[in-house]
Image: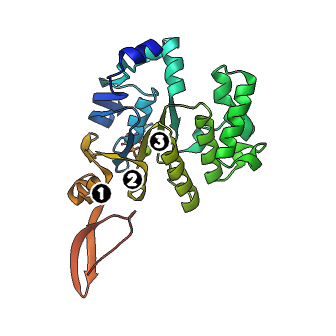
Amino acid sequence: MADMAAKNADAPLFLVEDVHFSYEGAPALAGATLSVERGERVALLGANGSGKSTLLKMLDGLLFPDRGRIGFMGQELSEATLRLDSFSREFRRRVGFVFQNADAQLFSPTVRDEVAFGPLHLGLPDDEVERRVEDTIHILGLGHLKERAPYHLSGGEKKRVALASVLAINPDVLLFDEPTAGLDPKTSSFLVSLAGDLHEAGKTIITATQDLSIVGDIADRALVMGEDHRLAGEGPPAAVLADRELLLRANLIHDHPHRHGGVEHYHPHSHVEGHEHGH
Ligand SMILES: Nc1ncnc2c1ncn2[C@@H]1O[C@H](COP(=O)(O)OP(=O)(O)O)[C@@H](O)[C@H]1O
Ligand SMILES: [Mg+2]
């Protein structure tokens, strides 16, 4: 794969071409096309059910297109290529996925074991495993929870353990699915700022979110998934957030009636940005 990386230096990190996918007949992706370059910071926006999580799972090689293809550094990401040990080992080392639901990611008896699992699987020497575990636990402020059972922690603590278990592998690419969903504001802003640090350290960050308030802080480019399960638009976060028509169409904001001074009228607003009516 080192050879492959050199050979395909010009290929995008991810190339998603006309990807279709259905769950037992229910469409989740219906012709999604996009690409992500190395070192980019991308937000994947879209209403509930538009296909964001499905797309992230495909970028992590957990699901495969019914039609269309996904390329990773110029190589097709498919069941067949992931069956090749050399490709799959390298792919798993390079790409890390932080699930929306931390419970789905945690299975070890202690926080320490959870964080050590990935590095141990990479076959790293014991002292290197130990170093990574200690560093990652420190970065995520989990020192006091090392011997605790992940299963019994709070939502925010579980999220930090899940993130630690991924960061301990030191992937180049991080896929975050709704990283701030259900978290308190302090943990949310900690995660957002950590994602910024990781990007500055050279990592590619792809974040699926419905939380429009974090987009400007977690991405330099925003992709909008429409309810028709394809890309509805993209651009710099500020431009996408200012495109009310696009956000309305993608059902990320909605019109509903307000009464001001006895006059009922409609105008668009977002429930995540808060309500501001300048009149
Ligand atoms: N495991 C599943 N089984 C059946 N349908 C699913 C499953 N996961 C997602 N879907 C459906 O696929 C569509 C896209 O879902 P998803 O990718 O989770 O969207 P998002 O992350 O944008 O909310 C939705 O209609 C959803 O109900
Ligand atoms: Mg989702």
Vertical comparison of 95 with 160: above or below: above
Mark nearer the N terminus (3 vs 1): 3
Vertical comparison of 44 with 9: above or below: below
Q: Is residue 34 at all visible to an observer of this figure?
A: yes
Disc 2 target residue: 215
x, y percent for residue 261: 25, 88
Give me the residue at 39% from left, 53% from top: 215
Residue toward you, 200 or 260 = 200
* Residue type, label 1: Leu
Instruction: Tell me whether the residue at label 3 lies in contact with that at label 2, contact meaning CB atoms closer than 8 angstroms.
Output: no
x, y percent for residue 168: 62, 34
- Judged from the image, the secondary structure of the residue bearing numbered disc 2 is helix
Instruction: Tell me whether the residue at label 2 lies in contact with that at label 1, contact meaning CB atoms closer than 8 angstroms.
Output: yes
Q: In the current view of this chain or complex, which residue is farthest to the right?
A: 147
Disc 3 target residue: 199
- Judged from the image, the secondary structure of the residue bearing numbered disc 1 is helix
Quadrant housing residue 241: bottom left
Label 3 vs label 2: CA separation?
Answer: 14 Å
* Residue type, label 3: His
Q: How many marks?
A: 3
Give me the residue at 50% from left, 51% from top: 192
x, y percent for residue 250: 27, 51
Label 3 vs label 1: CA separation?
Answer: 22 Å
Badge 3 crowding class, 10 Å Cα cut-off, few under 14, some 14 to 19, many 20 or more, is many
x, y percent for residue 193: 52, 52
- Which quadrant of the picture is home to ligand 1? top left
Disc 1 target residue: 241
